[in-house]
Image (spheres, coloured by chain):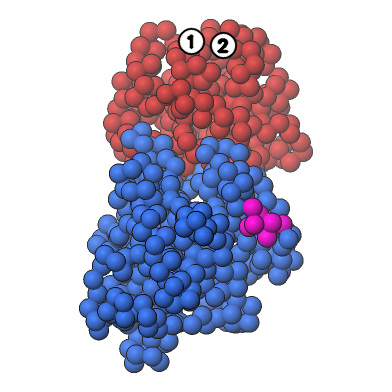
Amino acid sequence: MKYHADEKGYYGEFGGAFIPEMLYPNTEELRQNYIRIMEEPLFKKEFDQLLKDYVGRPTPLYFAERLSKKYNTKIYLKREDLCHTGAHKVNNTIGQILMAKKLGKNRIIAETGAGQHGVATATVCALMGIECVVYMGEIDIARQAPNVARMKMLGAEVRPALSGSRTLKDATNEAIRDWINNPVDTHYIIGSVVGPHPYPDMVARFQSVISEEIKWQLKEKEGVENPDFVVACVGGGSNAAGAYYHYLDNPEVGIIAVEAAGKGIDSGESAATSALGKVGIIHGSKTLLMQTQDGQITEPYSISAGLDYPGVGPMHAHLFRSGRGEFISITDDEAMKAGLLLSKLEGIIPAIESSHAFAILEYKKFRPDDIVVINLSGRGDKDLDTYINYFEL
Amino acid sequence: MNRINQKIKEGKKILSIYFTAGYPELNDTVRILEELEKNGVDLIEIGLPFSDPLADGPTIQESSTAALKKGMHTELLFEQLKDIRKSVSIPLIIMGYFNPVFQYGVEAFCKKCHEIGIDGLILPDLPLDVYQSEYEVIFKKYGLINVFLITPQTSDERIKQIDDASNGFIYMVSSASTTGTTKGFGEEQQHYFDRISAMKLKNPQIVGFGINNAETFKQATRSAAGAIIGSAFIKHLTSHGVDAISKFVKSIR
């Protein structure tokens, strides 16, 4: 079994490029060039340098002693929350802005849900002095005011997506429509391992720095490169793709993907795509997605805006279908509790997305000598309002 | 012979109209089809609404959302169309996005289209290579013509591939845009129309996107076999209703 994308962007039966002809030249240009560009020594050097000096990599692999003691196993946290802008998202936007420059593009568009990817995109556009337009659902604009302000300070234009349900999936539609209307000068920076080929593979490669670092960091600390388990939360799945990447073909490393169950899988308000989704096409990719019997895409729900996506990247659909990954879904309440626990035990306030990954420690029993790496994908500052309201702080 | 091929053979410039099934009212579908034929339209594209229509501008998006809200769905559309060949004889195409067709089952969908008397499908997000490797056999089995799109950015090489894979007409998108732009046609479009015309493709071309009145229809059909009007017709339905279809068609030619 293969777990990486093949030449046409398929992970098993999932992936591909189901796009209207209007998008064919754009994605084809990218498809023909992305691997060649990423392998150029000069590109690599510039990417690595920016990750080091600007993003602050390598991010620490931290042994969480008190958490380990509580759950009687060895837990390491991969501290993506310490990246510049507060989450792993910037690994991808740094890579893609360099890619856009190589391709001679002078305008960037992006979609955003909670605003994290929008901020990460606006940041690299400011860094490079490139025009930036971020599409964001009208409803999300209203509920994520601080991130909207950040993007504006960084010089980006935030355009409201007014169609459909006016959230992340519609912001993605609007960004794709913008790309159709501006096929020559514009690069679309997708924020996750979703969308048509080559996006899922390209984004996974840019995020793969996470597991590349885990390997040598773990070697330093434990004398082995491979943990017994890697745990990450999955919305579209970019932090998970990065954390799993170098372990995908190594069956000794268990892969655990944590989805948002929202108010419960059967509540009608959930974002647990592996449990509730069927095979279909969303944003140009064949994958698992939440939809009606008739094939209309439905609106997911999670307390965490970053997990609130009706599909999942094709890599993860394949990991689920093939049994390579273990998929667990965690409710809002369980995630919030886990976030509070991590704050109290380790002095780290996690993003609510990441809190979902920690919540599995209550349900999944690990052995005392298991090495469990949890990808702490983002910090909780952006979620303070949600924490305040939930815990009445 | 398929009705589409027959119609093109007649040699008259084709006026094709797109509308969203279930809009403005859920059960308007048959009446709209009959009115369009009665007023001399040559070919009709029946839009199967989708929640996330990537290639469409606001007008078609809004009509799709409204139709879905009123309860339009695939089986209902087939139900509405079951006797359509008793009253409408011009070629009919269903245009939609691939996911609803995929959920219905591609073979079941094509079979149903064949039973009703649908002549072809336009599924913009079903790519050429996937069509050829997985679905062409099914389309052929049920006598359905699959219509592909080309745009000003499509390379000559790919246009030739698409021409080879086509057996009805090529949907020629007039500009790099989603549906419903009203910029009119400038030098750039004329250059593109001429370029395609000079390629002497085996399939005729019908131009879509940006055609909204008699002038743009005339410009588009100077070298192409016909033109498709979508958003402008939907806007007209929104403000003047199904009763005024005749007025709209007469304003075009």
Hue used for the chain lettered A? blue
- Identify residue type, mark 1: Arg
**Looking at the image, which is closer to me, B162 or B233?**
B233
Tags 2 and 1 touching, CB below 8 Å: yes
Q: Which mark is residue B31?
A: 1
Does any portion of residue B133 appear in the rendered image? no
Residue at image coords 44%, 42%: A299
Q: Quadrant of residue B84?
A: top left
Q: Is B154 contained in the magenta span?
A: no
Vertical comparison of B89 with B196: above or below? above
N-term-proximal mark, 2 vs 1: 1
Q: Quadrant of residue A342?
A: bottom left
Q: Is A151 contained in the magenta span?
A: yes
In the displayed structure image, the side of residue A32 where residue A247 appears, left or right: left
Q: Which mark is residue B242?
A: 2
Chain letter belonging to callout 1 = B
- Which secondary structure lies at badge 2? helix
In the displayed structure image, the side of residue A58 where residue A333 appears, left or right: left
Instruction: Tell me the red chain.
Output: B
For label 2, the crowd category at 10 Å Cα-Cα, with few meaning under 14, some 14 to 19 and many 20 or more, is some
- List x then y, in percent, for residue A326: 27, 63
